[in-house]
Image (cartoon, rainbow, N blue to C red):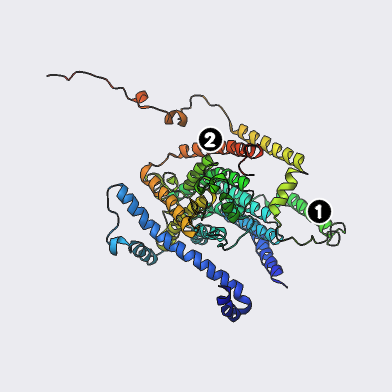
Amino acid sequence: MEAMLEPVAQFFGPVWPAVWTLAKIVAIIAPLMIGVAYLTLAERKVIGYMQVRIGPNRVGPMGLLQPIADGMKLLFKEIIVPSGASKGLFILGPILAIAPSLAAWAVVPFDDGMVLANVNAGLLFLLAITSMEVYGVIIAGWASNSKYPFLGSMRAAAQMVSYEVAMGFALICVLMISASLNLTDIVNSQGEGRFHEMGLSVFSWNWVPLFPMFVVFLISGIAETNRAPFDVVEGESEVVAGHMVEYSGMTFALFFLAEYANMFLVSTMTSVLFLGGWLSPVGGIPDGFHWLALKTAFILFLFLWARATFPRFRYDHIMRLGWKVFIPITLVWVIVVAVWMMSPLSIWK
Amino acid sequence: MDFKTFVFYILSAIMVFAALRVITARNPVHAALFLVLSFFTAGGIWLLLAAEFLAIVLVMVYVGAVMVLFLFVVMMLDINIDRLREGFWSYLPVGALIGVLLVVEMTLVLGGRYFGLEAMPEPPAVQAGYSNTRELGRLLYTDYVYPFELASLLLLVAMVVAVTLTLRKRKGVRYLNPSEQVSVKRGDRVELVSMPAEKE
């Protein structure tokens, strides 16, 4: 690989690192965007079959061109800026919504050594970047100068800040037992232990000793991405579409893309932190990117499954679940893990 | 000028501009958003100093949590900027005094020879495996464990006090108890009765 790239590197000279990094970014973002497009189709199909319908099947064979058609439609629609809106912020809203969900992929490892930026504080970076996702929603809601978007963004601010706390504590447990903030190290530390030697790596991953944290992280992830059953931010029956009411065309599409890119991100994070990333579940089979893709797809299916199964939570129930159920559970489990690690029964020595 | 210095000047320029806009923006929401921008660029400058933990925590705490709640409040207030400006001249002397004090303090620190560049030699370059986070954690939980725990205790007290201030008992308020609602069984709400069919 290095030898093959040598002539290209010489051609670009001193700007080569920048060009190479850009190429890597494109190699991450382009498949992600295609994945996002087809996740929307998968969602409609999965929910369709769960409700004994067929789902979209008109555009292309088995409806496979549906996301392309949707994208084209949104691309060619007019962007209408409401007359009372704060124009600059109205446009900035969707941009700020999608930027963090793309920037976070910089530290996500896809395979051993296959990561854009192998930084020491990768986990912290993820937490910081995902905590900025809420700005897009808040700014959009305020800049629209309209009642429903404003209510939606108020809900978003409270909900996303609440669930971040529980998510943060779940991540503290993970970093305690892997003794590292580097995501590659976190994955590698899951491929050790007694079960791994027996050839059952699936039980040496973090989801077994940290099972409560795994569940809390997954549910908080659904709440963070404002997906059903936590989608009160855009609850149709109450606030029409929340922060997206006044948006049309591509600005609306950006919110849509951001939501699905966030789903991808949370699923990948769950796979990396709790389900062993690219490690294979049993011994003797080679590890690789395909395992990460399979695990991510499974978690994504859980997202869709939850949407088709549960009715929307009432707002006070969401707040109660976040503050009065998840945060006490995570606090207790942090202490349990700390005591466990210091006791002779520790399995992480 | 190497690349690092170049980045530093860009970040500083953005930060100074954003900080100026915080106090000059007419709209309080715009001002709050410019404050977010200046926090974010400050995080970038700390990253240049290889203090990645502090930088990321600054973004996480101030940008991700504090400013969100700040915006939350600012957006809900209908602030009339003209009425706020009415008392400008009466507040000016106090404001000017505080401003002068700040300038004096900063000149003392920045200009004094005990704080100058020669008094603070450049720290040795970090090794490849150096982790700022690990070093901070080690210091906080060994050498400075008592001050650290004391500070966290103070914060906990402040938190409890803040919560207590919002607590008030009102009589005659009806509210739903989610725990009770969730734990409701069918038998609590539906009574099945067996009755014979009525004949005409």
Residue A237 percent coordinates (x, y) = 37, 44
Residue named by callout 2? A324
Marks 1 and 2 on same chain? no
Q: Is residue B5 above or below residue B53?
A: below
- Type of amino acid under label 1: Glu
Kindly tell me whether residue A279 is visible in this rendering. yes
The crowding category of the residue bearing disc 1, from other C-alpha atoms within 10 Å (few below 14, some 14 to 19, many at least 20), is few
Q: Mark 2 lies on which chain?
A: A
Residue B156 percent coordinates (x, y) = 67, 36
Residue A133 percent coordinates (x, y) = 53, 54
Q: Quadrant of residue A2?
A: bottom right
Kindly tell me whether residue A128 is visible in this rendering. no
Where's the C terminus of chain A, which quadrant?
top right
The residue lying at 24 percent from left, 19 percent from top is B194
Residue at the extreme left: B200
B25 displayed left or right of A222? right
The crowding category of the residue bearing disc 2, from other C-alpha atoms within 10 Å (few below 14, some 14 to 19, many at least 20), is few
The residue nearer to you, when weighing B172 against A72, is A72
Residue named by callout 1? B105
Where's the N terminus of chain A, which quadrant?
bottom right
The residue nearer to you, when weighing B155 against B38, is B155
Q: Mark 1 lies on which chain?
A: B
Q: In this view, does A91 lie above or below B155?
A: below
Mark 1 to mark 2: distance in Å?
A: 45 Å
Q: Is mark 1 on a helix, strand or loop?
A: helix
Residue A335 percent coordinates (x, y) = 62, 37
